[in-house]
Image: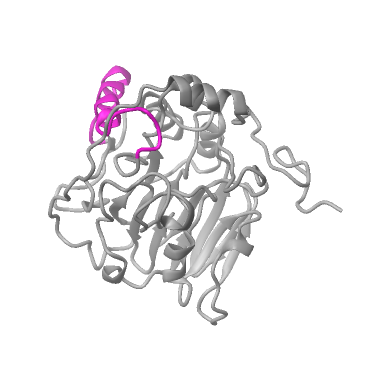
Amino acid sequence: MSTFPKSDHCDGERFFNRYESADRSFGEVLKWMRTRQRTRWPKQVALAKHPTPPVRVEPGQAGITFIGHSTFLIRTASRVLITDPVFTSHAGPFGRLGPRRVRPPAIAPDALPPIDVVFVSHNHYDHFQPSSLRLFAARASFAAPLGLARSLPSEGGSLGSIVELDWWQSATVNGAQITSVPAQHFSARTPWDRDRTLWCGFVVQVDGITVYFAGDTGYSPHFAEIAVRFPSIDVALLPIGAYEPRWFMTPAHMNPEEAVRAHLDLRPRLSIGMHFGTFQLTDEGIDDPLRALEQARGAAGVDANAFRVLDFGESFVTGDQKGRGIQETS
C-alpha cells in the first residue's frame, strides 16, 4: 500500500519534481566540496533599528516584516501569519550545528504578536527547526506539505491544528484560505530520508489580500502555472540567495536573475526578496544577491519598487496611503 497518493510528483513513497530533478550524486557533492570557492562572510552583522511592525492594517492591506532568511511576519486586517520560522543560532541539527547565523532574528520570539497560522514549506534545517516551531504550538495552526504533519509540534489544544496539503490542494486554516503550490526543490534531513516528504510554496488569501510565499525553489514553469490559477497576487515572497556555484545549485535555488524571471511570470503587484544574508549556505558573498538583483531588475526593465528587498527588521504596508504602497509592474 502506498504511503501517499500517486501523482505526477509522487510514486506513492517518494516525491519528485515534474520538470527537472534536484538530486545530486555523492560524487557531485564531493566535487563541490573539493572545488568550491567560498566567499568569506563576516562573523556577525549588527541589525539596524526600524519601527516596530504595524499592529493594525486595513482590509486589502498586508503588513510585511522581514525577520530573516525565509521568515516573515505578515499581518492582515484579522490575521497574523509567519513563514518558515527559524530562530536558532545555526541552520543544522538541533539548531546548534551547521551554518552559523550571522544576523540575529530581527524580532525575538517573545516580541512577536500572537500568531494565527504558521507556514512550513519543507523540512530543510534552514526552514524547519522543531524548537522554533514549538514556540507556536499552543495557539497557532500549521500549514505544511504532505508528510510533515508527524514532525510538527502539537499540544492538543482546541486553538491549534495541523493541515497537510498536496500541491494545488486548498483548505481554510484559522480563517485564511490556503493553497499549497508547487516548488522546484527536494527534501531531506538525513542521508536516508531524501524526498520522503513534499516541498511546496503557499498562496494565502485573507481579508482581501493575496500573498504568495515561494518557500525554497529553483526556477521552472511552475511560476507561470501559479499565475494562471492566481492572476491577482498582491505580494510574492521570492528567494534570491544560496545559488553559487550554478552548476550545482541551479535545480534547487534561483539566482536573482531567475527570481526576476519568476516575478515576470507571476505578475504580482510587488515581489520581495528573501533567503539571503542570514546563513552562509553556498558560495556567493553575503551582499552578492542584493547587487545581482539590482542588475537583473535593470536588465529586465523591472522597477525597484516592483521587486524590492526589505532590510532585516524593516516593515512594509501594501497600499499604504502615505506613499509606501506597492506599484503596478509595467
Image location of residue 312, percent across then percent down: 23, 49
* Residue at image location 34% in from the left, 47% down from the top: 100
Q: Give the answer, above or below, for where 103 lies relative to 171.
A: above
Decide which of 242, 140 is in the foreground and name it: 242
Which image quadrant for residue 30? Answer: top right
Which residue is at the front of the view, 327 or 1? 1
Residue situated furthest front in the rendering: 34
Magenta-span inclusion, residue 222: no
Left/right of residue 308 with respect to residue 99 in the rendered view: left
Quadrant (top left, top right, bottom left, bottom right) of the C terminus? top left
Q: Choose between 314 and 44: the one closer to the eye.
A: 44
Q: Which residues are magenta?
A: 280-305
User: Would you say 203 lies left or right of 11 here?
Assistant: left
Q: Is residue 248 left or right of residue 115?
A: right
Q: Residue at x 28, y 35 (%)?
A: 306
Closest to the observer, 68 or 192:
192
